[in-house]
Image (spheres, grey):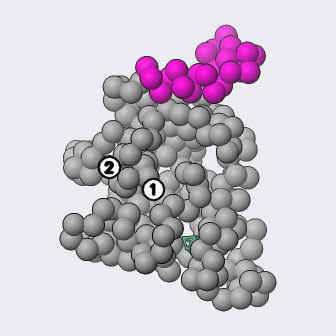
Amino acid sequence: MTAIQEERTTGDLKALAERAGRELEDASALEILQWAAKTFGDRFCVTSSMEDAVVAHLASRALPGVEVVFLDTGYHFPETIGTRDAVEAVMDVNVITLTPRQTVAEQDAEYGPKLHDRDPDLCCALRKVKPLEEGLKGYLAWATGLRRDESPTRANTPVVGWDEKRQKVKISPIARWSQEDVQTYVTEHGVLTNPLLMDGYASVGCAPCTRRVLEGEDARAGRWAGLSKTECGLHG
Ligand code: SF4
C-alpha cells in the first residue's frame, strides 16, 4: 500500500500535507517533487503561468510526462502562448490547457467590455479561479511556482501545505528560492522562459493587468498596478 492510500483511508490528507511541509522544509526542490511523484503519482499536477518552465522542468525530472496545467484566460500575451507551445513541444510533460466557460467576447456581451478594469476580482474569478477549480478536481495535489521572496503576501508559503479552498495538497517546491536561484537553474538546464522576462517584465500575467516593473520594485509590482489587488485568487 502506498503512503497516499494509507493516508486516504484515514481521511488525513491534510495531516500528510502539514507533516510533509515540516519534514521537507530543508529538502531540495527536486526532492520535494520526487516525494510528490511517489506519494500521488498521476493524481499530481503542476500549474504554470508560462512565465518560465522551471517547476515544470523540475517536475518532469521527478515524474516524466507529468501533467502541466495552464490557464488560458483569453487575455494572455502572444509570448505566453508561444512559451506554452514550446514547453509542450520540447519537454517531457503533458500540457493541459484550461479555458473559462465564456470567451472574452461572450463575457463582454454579458458584463460589458473591459471587466478587468472595472471589477478585476470578478474577472479573475470567472477566467482563473473557477476554471482552475474545475480543472483540479481529478488531482489530489498540485504544484505551483510560488516563492517567498516575490512579495510580502507570499513570505510564509510552505513547501508543502494544505489548500483549504480546494481540499488538496499544495506544493511549492521553489518556495525558498530567490530570483537568482531561478536564473541559475534556467541557465544550467537551458529551461524555456517567457521572452517578456527579457523585456522589463518581472512577473507575467494577463496583458491588460501586467506592466513592466521599475527599478527597486518587487517582482509582482507590475501586476494590477495602481490597484490594491495583489493576487488573482488562485493562491488565496
Ligand atoms: Fe481578468 Fe486581469 Fe484577472 Fe486576467 S488578470 S483574469 S484580465 S482581471
Give the left or right position of residue 53, taking residue 229 as reference.
Answer: left
Instruction: Please say if 116 is above or below 236.
Output: below
Residue bearing the label numbered 2: 149
Q: Residue at x 71, y 77 (%)?
A: 103
Give the left or right position of residue 164, taking residue 232 as reference.
Answer: right
Q: Earlier in the sequence, mark 2 or mark 1?
A: 1
Q: Quadrant of residue 67?
A: top right
Q: Is mark 2 within 8 Å of ligand 1?
A: no
Residue bearing the label numbered 1: 87
Give the left or right position of residue 148, taking residue 121 as reference.
Answer: left
Foreground label between 2 and 1: 2
Q: Residue at x 68, y 43 (%)?
A: 166
Magenta-colored stretch includes residue 68: no
Where in the image, quadrant-wise, is ligand 1 located?
A: bottom right
The answer to whether any part of residue 60 appears in the image is: no
Query: In the rendered structure, which amino acid carries the disc numbered 2?
Result: Asp
Task: Looking at the picture, tell me which residue is in the foreground, 66 or 34.
Answer: 34
Task: Looking at the picture, tell me which residue is in the foreground, 189 or 181.
Answer: 181
